[in-house]
Image (cartoon, rainbow, N blue to C red):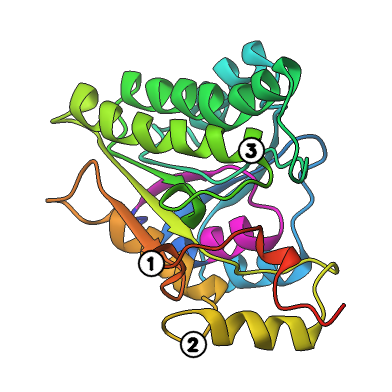
Amino acid sequence: MTSAGLALVTGSCRRLGAHIAATLAAAEYDVALHASRDPKPDAWAIAAIEAAGVAWHGFACDLNDFSAVERLVPAVAAHFGRRVDVLVNNASLFDAGDGKLPDAAALVAHYRVNVAAPIALATALAEQGGRAVVNILDQRIARPHRDQLAYTLSKQALAEATRTLAAVLSPLVRVNAVAPGLTLPTVDYTPAQLDALAAMMPLRHLPSPQAIADAVRFLVDAESSTGQTLYVDGGAAQTCFARDFVHLGRDD
């Protein structure tokens, strides 16, 4: 089978990143999976990728370690014997810090992983001839609330980096972004709370992981789009929420 290209997806051994990697594999992209330490993908993700008949391999890289970040794209290219065509910056640092102003250490930590590392990886992709970058943001950047401020500020910075890199790296590399809403809730959410949250969305539903992955795939191949952010959030970005979703729609 002829490959559509080689895609590196950070944070892709589980959760949303695994769905993105599996969707790109279904589109005939060979995929480089990434984890901070031990890259052991979820079994369902391995099955989906192997069913697509593409090549894949896992890579460990601590995105807080800039020397490791600088080696990641060359390591992926060396393993597969060709350039990395597509980069999806999905991995993020998220520290709750609800309702509190972050200290300098928290701000720097989030910036290193959520902004500096994606920019460094995008730069490396451009230097070896890649063609598309998709950054994963968060719908909260449109109407921020007071929770998890260090995380929010870092995602806002990555949104601006998306627009700036689109200008700097054109015409050879397109840089776009997807801003998801609440998609894969943690155990902190109850089923009743998720139903209540879905009812709060303008579209009356929460986005699925597949909807996010499909948006990424669209932007990967959108030859006439760069510097764009696609919100896939059930309409959440159109509404002002006073707090993070985990605090909303609860009975207590």
Q: The disc labelled 3 sits on which kind of residue?
A: Leu
The kind of residue tagged 2 is Arg
* Residue depicted at x 60% and y 55%: 17
Q: CA distance from mark 2 to mark 3?
A: 27 Å
The answer to whether the residues at label 1 and label 3 have Cβ atoms under 8 Å apart is no
Tell me whether the residue at label 2 lies in contact with that at label 1, contact meaning CB atoms closer than 8 angstroms: no
Q: Classify residue 215 as left or right of residue 60.
A: left
Q: Which residue is mark 1?
A: 238
Q: Position of residue 62 (x, y in %)?
A: 72, 27
Q: Earlier in the sequence, mark 1 or mark 3?
A: 3
Q: Which residues are magenta?
A: 5-22
Residue 59 is left or right of residue 128, and the answer is right
Q: Secondary structure at mark 2?
A: loop
Pick whichever, 67 or 58, lies toward us: 67
- Please state the horizontal and vertical placement of residue 55, each as a whole percent of the image: 54, 53
Q: Which residue is mark 3?
A: 149
Image quadrant assignment for residue 239: bottom left
Amino acid type at mark 1: Gln
Helix, strand or loop for disc 3:
helix
What is the x, y in percent for residue 135? 43, 43
Disc 2: CA contacts within 10 A as few (<14), some (14-19) or many (>=20):
some
How packed is label 3: few (under 14 Cα within 10 Å), some, or many (20 or more)? Answer: many
Labelled disc at residue 204: 2
Q: Quadrant of the N terminus?
A: bottom left
Of the residues tagged 2 and 1, which is closer to the observer? 1
Q: Earlier in the sequence, mark 2 or mark 1?
A: 2
Whether residue 48 is situated above or below residue 198 in the rendered picture = above
